[in-house]
């Protein structure tokens, strides 16, 4: 395959990091207590969803880069019980995501990898899933914020 | 630019149509009345969100293909007042989306276009926005369904 790319590797990373910047603003918009306790219809609070996103991004990329198919786990995130701690981990992960992502050669994006020992798909699909899953849960967070009477950040802000 | 594409044009279309297939299942999961009347925290009902998605996909692609920057409009969708009508329009748009998308040359994805006379970005960003916006609103729909006591379709089903 050699043609004009419709999106470059650098652009996809920028796209993802832009989404992460918006998700960070959504985390920030929650009051401390509600971040970990509030939800609608028995779904997980947004703090739990944010921890899921943390458990996917860096560990998922580490798996891809090192071809290590360890299981998905939120172990290691138990200590994250405050908004400040979520945001600190979020910010620590930002450069790690770029560094790991940049280690994936263009030619590997169509290579199949068994992410978390469970999701056996081309690497591009795994990475698009990371982004889609973040947008999906953040959409859920927008409803929580509206239910709390809080104006969410603009969706197009990145 | 000429390198190994991390995602091809055909793959991005498949990715989008996969998301549309999931959104269709979310529309289907709503009872007729709740599709147009139910919401959480004063947000728009899911039927209105689905109409927004219909007003973006085909009209947006027509704008891109024909370089026509007419304003965003939901005119023409007023007649869609039943679940059956939403799904019929959804299905009619599926092949139109593929046909229009396929008319965009790879080399045009980095060309800037003033979508709806308002969003002046490279075409790839406009198209990613269509997909992201759909995932975002569908995430909102998942909360509505849960609030109605209805199990939403699995997120990974496409």
Image (cartoon, coloured by chain):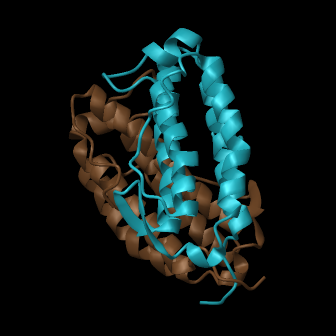
Chain colours: A brown, B cyan
Q: Which quarter of the image is occupied by the N terminus of chain A? A: bottom right
- Residue A127 location (% of width, % of height): 60, 63
**In this picture, residue A41 sits left or right of residue A104:** left
Which residue is painted at 74% across and 58% down in the image? A117
Looking at the rendered structure, the number of numbered marks drawn on it comes to 0
Viewer-proximal residue among B12 and A60: B12
- Residue B156 location (% of width, % of height): 67, 43
The residue furthest top is B33
Q: Is residue B139 visible?
A: no
Image quarter of residue B84: top right
**In this picture, residue A8 sits left or right of residue A94:** right
Viewer-proximal residue among B149 and B71: B71
- Residue B11 location (% of width, % of height): 72, 63
Which residue is painted at 32% across and 29% down in the image? A38
Which residue is painted at 31% across and 22% down in the image? B41
Figure check: B7 above or below B118:
below
The residue furthest bottom is B2
Q: Is residue A2 visible?
A: yes
Figure check: B28 above or below B17:
above
Which residue is painted at 53% across and 17% down in the image? B81
Image quarter of residue B108: bottom right
Q: Which quarter of the image is occupied by the C terminus of chain A? A: bottom left
Figure check: B92 above or below A9:
above
Figure check: A44 above or below B41:
below
Image quarter of residue A14: bottom left
**In this picture, residue B40 sits left or right of residue B68:** left
- Residue B122 location (% of width, % of height): 46, 70
């Amino acid at each position: 395959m050699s043609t004009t790319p419709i999106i470059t590797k650098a652009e996809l990373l920028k796209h993802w990091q832009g989404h992460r910047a918006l998700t960070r603003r959504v985390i920030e918009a929650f009051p401390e207590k509600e971040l970990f306790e509030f939800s609608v219809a028995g779904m997980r609070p947004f703090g739990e969803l944010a921890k899921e996103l943390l458990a996917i991004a860096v560990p998922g990329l580490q798996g891809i880069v090192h071809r290590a198919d360890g299981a998905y786990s939120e172990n290691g995130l138990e200590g994250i019980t405050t908004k400040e701690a979520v945001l600190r981990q979020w910010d620590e992960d930002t450069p790690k995501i770029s560094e790991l992502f940049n280690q994936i050669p263009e030619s590997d994006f169509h290579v199949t990898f068994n992410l978390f020992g469970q999701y056996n798909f081309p690497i591009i699909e795994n990475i698009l899933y990371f982004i889609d899953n973040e947008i999906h849960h953040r959409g859920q967070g927008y409803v929580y914020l509206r239910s709390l009477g809080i104006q969410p950040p603009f969706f197009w802000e990145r």
